[in-house]
Image (cartoon, rainbow, N blue to C red):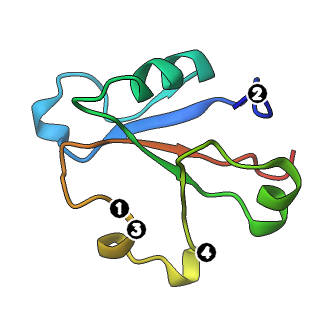
Amino acid sequence: MDRLPSMLLLASSLALAAQPSPPFRLIGVEELESMQRDTAHPPAVLDANEPEFREKNGIIPGARLLSSFDRYDVARELPADRATPLIFYCADRL
């Protein structure tokens, strides 16, 4: 993850009713690393960058590559377990 040191990540969970906090929040790289060490409830990390950006800058290890918005299929791309924390990231052409 050292190639994306200043990137902020958007964290969410599909189990919104079970959470008293807001459904989305920004997290930093350090918090993501901590979350990834949680073997009981690891997050699903989802890369929403374009292929060209991924090729040039790499991806977060273990991230799932999301398809483009016009081919996006929630059932195929998001985890079936609705309690899985979701981490989305996109550089938007830095």
**Residue receiving disc 2:** 2
Which x, y percent locates residue 79?
29, 58
Graded by Cα atoms within 10 Å as few (under 14), some (14 to 19) or many (20 or more), the crowding at tag 3 reads few
Q: Nearer the viewer, mark 2 or mark 3?
A: 2
Q: CA distance from mark 2 to mark 3?
A: 25 Å
Question: The N terminus appears in which quarter of the rendering?
Answer: top right
**Residue receiving disc 3:** 77
The dot on residue 68 is: 4
Position of residue 91 in the picture relative to residue 40 (left or right): right
Rendered position, 47 above or below 4? below
Position of residue 76 in the picture relative to residue 32 (left or right): left
Q: Residue at x 10, y 33 (%)?
A: 18
Graded by Cα atoms within 10 Å as few (under 14), some (14 to 19) or many (20 or more), the crowding at tag 2 reads few
The dot on residue 78 is: 1
Q: Are marks 1 and 3 in contact (CB under 8 Å)?
A: yes
- Identify residue type, mark 1: Leu
Query: If you read the primary sequence from the N terminus, does the residue marked by circle 3 or circle 4 appear first?
Result: 4
Q: Residue at x 77, y 57 (%)?
A: 54
- Identify residue type, mark 4: Ser
Query: If you read the primary sequence from the N terminus, does the residue marked by circle 4 or circle 1 appear first?
Result: 4
Q: Nearer the viewer, mark 3 or mark 4?
A: 3
